[in-house]
Amino acid sequence: MLAMATFVGFVLLVTALIHLYLWKRLVRDTTVPGRRRRVGGIAVLLLAVLIPTTMIVTNAGVRWVAWPGYLWLALMFYLLVVLLVLEVPMAVARLVLRRRAVVAEPTAAAPEPALVGAADPLAGGATADDHGGQPVDPPAAAAVGQPDHDPSRRLLLARGAAIFAGLTAAGITGYGVRTALGAPQLDRVQIPLAKLPRSMDGLRIATVSDIHLGPLTGRGHTERIVTMINRLDADLVAIVGDLVDGSVAELGDEAAPLHDLHSRYGSFFVTGNHEYYSGVEDWVREVDRLGVRVLQNERQEIHARGGVLDLAGVNDVTAHGSGLAAPPDYAAALADRDPSRPVVLLAHQPVAAQEAAKFGVDLQLSGHTHGGQMAPFNLLVPLQQPVVSGLGEVDGTKVYVTNGAGFWGPPVRVGAPPQVTLVELRAP
């Protein structure tokens, strides 16, 4: 409970700081004091409140807030990225303007001799005596001690940067929405396994993860994925976690099309971290009722084409408790098996391979990372996971990570399109 409160507090602090920065660059720097600045400040404040409000009320079942809230979250992120990239060129531009202003600063002209008390009878100007005996040129006097740093140019520069950032962020977000809501792309990958019998060469596993049924999806999202998988006519179907973001009562109808999955040797599922936020016991029972076997720290022998392959599955690394919410138990799933057989492990997070490798796992199929979902997040994922997307290796165990077929949070994908993968196992 304390950890969750700490995390929420951290998120609120980061959100506040980001919006303060956006107010500085998009409102304060682009306006003069007055009504427009006040209106802009209020707008930024409301948008800052919208993000935590969206997360709270969406979890409470109020779905209509999800679209504006999560879209602003994505737009906010890309505004932040673009403005940070612009900081260096903007600083250089401001420095150039300041130097030009100093060079162009007018200086007082040398005084011309004049008689004390004399006045210009044509100009009707002041006499020298009116200024302590020194002749003064009125325009020059106004310029002395008042360097013009041309605030209008600085204002124009700030507005140009704000417009550029706004258009760029909006364009990236729009592209990301179109990608995330579009059909998943089909990737095919061939992975050689040294222990795979020649008779099982070409065994195909349709792999999907991170479907993330939730407030921004619908039954059609599941139906499209099921139809796509069924067209592959695969030998096995593997759903490697994060199926849902909500309870069975809320999302049972959206998950129902999973009942129509078909393959030669069965469909299998392992839990992801989001199942443990959504009532894992209920979902394990529901998925099993739909005809998809849940592998919870156990393995299944797959007899195909005259050979045998061990298909194992472990609970997600975030699981804790007992029963259906028990943490991953690699020994229960992988120990005491025939070492001559190839074993494929289903584990939601790629990091599980660090333990799986100790049991001689030949191949691990995972998801969780979303491929980064929104670049440049893909650059941060390696801080936590050994493989971000595609095929990699951890301590001798091959790890294939699929991007996932859905999205979490913003309905946006940039640089990591939704994906269903057909994994084809090859004998040496």
Image: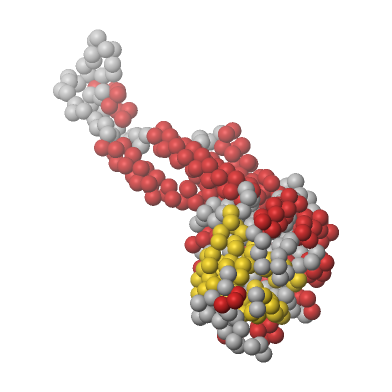
Q: Quadrant of residue 300?
A: bottom right
Count of marks overlaid on the render: 0
- Residue at 26% across / 23% down in the picture? 137
Measured from the top left, where is residue 233 in percent x and y? 67, 61
Seen from this angle, which residue lies furthest bottom?
336
Query: Do we see residue 314 in this rendering?
Result: no
Q: Residue furthest top?
A: 122
- Rendered position, 260 above or below 202: above
User: Which residue, as the protein is rendered here, is positioned at the far left?
Assistant: 113
Q: Position of residue 297 (x, y in %)?
A: 71, 79
- Quarter location, residue 262: bottom right
Q: Is residue 424 left or right of residue 111?
A: right
State the image coordinates of residue 60 (x, y, percent, origin top left). 79, 56
Is residue 170 something one can see in this rendering? yes
**Residue at 32% over, 28% down:** 142
In this image, 260 relative to 380: left or right? right
Q: Position of residue 348 (x, y in %)?
A: 64, 70
Q: Nearer the viewer, residue 272 or 263?
A: 263
| Residue occupying the point 50% across, 77% down | 428
Residue located at (21% from left, 28% from top): 109
Q: Quadrant of residue 8?
A: bottom right
Q: Is residue 277 above or below residue 416?
A: below
Q: Nearer the viewer, residue 29 or 403?
A: 403
Image height check: is 166 above or below 236? above
Residue 250 vertical placement versus 24 (above, below): below
Quadrant (top left/top right/bottom left/bottom right) for the N terminus: bottom right
Foreground pick, 174 / 43:
174
The coloring applied to the image is secondary structure
